[in-house]
Amino acid sequence: GTRVWLNAESRLRYPVVFMGEERKVEMEGEVYFEVAKNEQKPFVVRLKGYDIKVLGTVFNVKAYPDMDYSTTSLISGKVFLTSCNEQVLRPSETARIDRQSGVITTYRGDEDFQLAWTKGLYKFKDKPFSEVVAELERLYDVTILIEDEKLARAIFTGSFVLENTIEKVLKPLGQYNKFRYRMEGQVIRIYPK
């Protein structure tokens, strides 16, 4: 059968029994799918603004409500994205769908980074610190305030084990990237050194 993995703050809605001509689910957050092939009943993932239709494939979808875009990364098989236009994804491709316009842009994805969470890691490459912080907030259920706009725009690359505490993540990040932080319960303030 079909198997799914849900990342932090993710939801998947599905019926008890799939009726009709499609196996339709709704999701938000980040979900990794291994869909069992069934040509008589295609699998459809419904998101805000677009649908993903598959016959049997492995793919990852990242579509948190606070993001301006969502991504669909194909590992194997083929998926059809339907928004304001239709796009076919081939293995190793990622589609970025703009939430406002519905425009789909495809590029060669980096599976190692996109699927790291399924292996208990968080990897990021050339990301603004503000995006890294948004992910840390989701993963650790904290609020992080960056007290410097230049630091928020700074580009970061790194990785860490998800089992680590937030302190074990921030300490080496701060040492390498020259920031300090202060924890106040579930709120973390980050300052430049």
Image: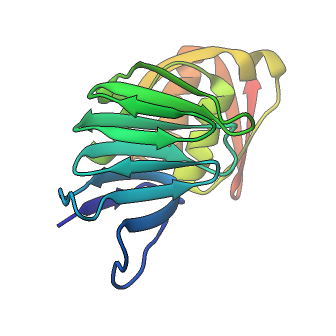
Instruction: Name the residue located 41 percent from the left edge and 28 percent from the top edge.
Output: 94
Q: Position of residue 13 (x, y in %)?
A: 48, 72
> Which quarter of the picture shows residue 38?
bottom left
Left or right? Give the position of 26 relative to 67.
left
Q: Position of residue 181 (x, y in %)?
A: 69, 35
Residue 23 appears in the figure: yes
In the figure, 121 relative to 156: above or below?
Answer: below
| Near-viewer residue (69 or 191) | 69
> Which quarter of the picture shows residue 73?
top left
Left or right? Give the position of 22 relative to 58.
right
Q: Position of residue 11 (x, y in %)?
A: 50, 65
Numbered disc total:
0
Residue 160 appears in the figure: no
**Quadrant into which the N terminus falls:** bottom left
Instruction: Name the residue located 17 percent from the left edge and 56 percent from the top edge.
Output: 37
Instruction: Name the residue located 54 percent from the left edge and 60 percent from the top edge.
Output: 9
Left or right? Give the position of 177 relative to 151.
left
Left or right? Give the position of 105 relative to 23.
right
In the figure, 180 relative to 8: above or below?
Answer: above
**Quadrant into which the C terminus falls:** top right
In the figure, 121 relative to 137: above or below?
Answer: above
| Near-viewer residue (177 or 9) | 9
Structure colour scheme: rainbow
Q: Position of residue 33 (x, y in %)?
A: 31, 53
In the figure, 46 relative to 134: above or below?
Answer: below
| Near-viewer residue (155 or 74) | 74
Instruction: Name the residue located 39 percent from the left edge and 50 percent from the top edge.
Output: 53
Please, which residue is most extreme toward the bottom here? 16
